[in-house]
Image (cartoon, helix red, strand yellow):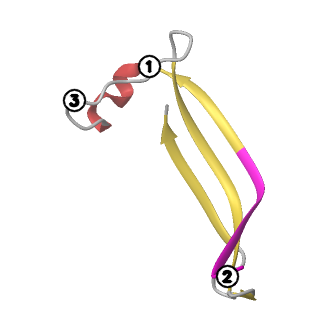
Amino acid sequence: MPETFLSARWENLIMANYAIDPELLKSYLPKGVIHDFYQNKIYVSLVGFMFKTKLFHIPLPFLEHLKKSIFAFM
């Protein structure tokens, strides 16, 4: 079995979803892309988490407690 090159773990994950007016997103979508509806609504999601990584099983100090947030359209 090959040795693991890179491993990562998500911790302290939180997600918030908000229903919004489709017109608010219109200017942010590339040409030809359409909204994705769920139960006749459009949602925006904000995701925050801690990301721990190791390279060949060695913790990377500058990435070990990396805080991330992702703002995604649904």
Residue indicated by mark 3: 32
Q: Which amino acid type is marked by label 1?
A: Asp
| Circle 1 residue | 21
The crowding category of the residue bearing disc 1, from other C-alpha atoms within 10 Å (few below 14, some 14 to 19, many at least 20), is few
> Whole-percent x and y of residue 35?
38, 24
Q: Looking at this rendering, what residue extends furthest in the front direction?
A: 1
Is residue 24 a member of the stretch shown in magenta?
Answer: no
- Residue 5 sits inside the magenta stretch: yes
In the foreground, 60 or 57: 57
* Residue at x-position 49% and y-position 31%: 74
- Tell me where the magenta segment starts and ends, as one range: 1-14
Which residue: 72% across, 75% down? 65
Relative side of 70 to 1, left or right: left
Secondary structure of the residue carrying tag 2 is: loop
The amino acid on which the numbered mark 3 sits, given as a three-letter code, is Gly
Q: Position of residue 57 (x, y in %)?
A: 75, 86
The crowd level at tag 2 (other Cα within 10 Å; few <14, some 14-19, many 20+) is few
Q: Quadrant of residue 56?
A: bottom right
* Position in image of residue 33 (x %, y %): 28, 30
